[in-house]
């Protein structure tokens, strides 16, 4: 199922959840640091880059696209971590690991977002 949203089309699964994809962007293979970006909705909140799937788009491709748009990074897609479900917002997000190989100075959302590495426990 699809529904138009300004500048994009939302896609839904069979249960009516919005289909999304995201990546935990890591600096190296030990995965002790992840890259986060500031939220475009909540000032000062740090989030994992991700967003909605386009019609007929595979979750892994959407995850790579969203990371480029929101965080300005490229890399090697790693393992699938699972699906995160947010029942309150009716989202289901496919989450992958992305090993960052390039950080762009300017990217699509660089005027509205910051990015930073954060250490994992």
Image: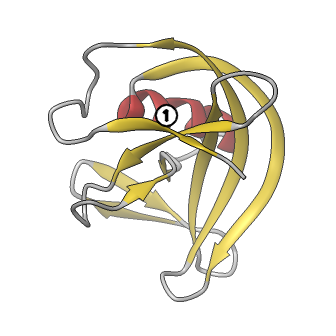
- Judge from the rendering whether residue 37 lies leftward or rightward of residue 84; answer left or right: left
Relative to the observer, which residue lies in front, 76 or 61?
76
Would residue 119 be found to the left or right of residue 115 on screen? right
Q: Looking at the image, is 59 positioned above or below residue 107?
A: below
**Which residue occupies 60% across, 39% down?**
34
Residue 39 lies in quadrant = bottom left
Residue 88 on image: x %, y %: 52, 89
Quadrant housing residue 43: bottom left
Q: How many marks?
A: 1
> Image point 17% across, 41% down: which residue?
112
**Quick one: which residue is furthest to the left in this view?**
111
Classify 10 Å Cα crowding around label 1: few (below 14), some (14-19), many (20 and above): many
Residue at horizontal 15%, vertical 33%? 111
User: Foreground residue, 39 or 10?
Assistant: 39
Q: Position of residue 87 (x, y in %)?
A: 60, 86
Residue 46: percent from left, percent from top: 40, 55
Question: How far across and down, in percent of the image, does residue 1 sit?
Answer: 55, 67
Q: For this rendering, which residue is in front, 112 or 8?
A: 112
Q: Which residue is mark 1?
A: 67
**Disc 1 secondary structure class:** helix
* Relative depth, front residue between 101 and 107: 101
Looking at the picture, does residue 50 appear above or below residue 13? Answer: above
Q: Residue furthest bottom?
A: 88
Which residue: 28% across, 38% down? 114
Asked if 91 appears above or below 45 in the picture, the reply is below
Taking 21 as reference, is 11 above or below it? below
- Residue 111 placement, left or right of 73: left
């Amino acid at each position: 199922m699809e529904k138009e949203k300004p500048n994009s089309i939302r896609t839904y699964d069979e249960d009516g959840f919005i289909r999304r994809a995201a990546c935990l962007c890591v600096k190296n293979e030990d995965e002790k640091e992840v890259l986060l970006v500031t939220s475009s909705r909540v000032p000062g909140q740090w989030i994992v880059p991700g967003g909605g799937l386009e019609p007929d788009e595979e979750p892994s491709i959407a995850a790579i696209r969203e990371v480029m748009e929101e965080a300005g990074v490229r890399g090697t897609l790693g393992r699938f971590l699972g699906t995160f479900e947010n029942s309150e917002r009716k989202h289901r997000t496919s989450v992958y690991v992305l090993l960052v190989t390039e950080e762009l100075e300017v990217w699509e959302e660089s005027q509205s977002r910051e990015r930073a590495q954060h250490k994992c426990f």
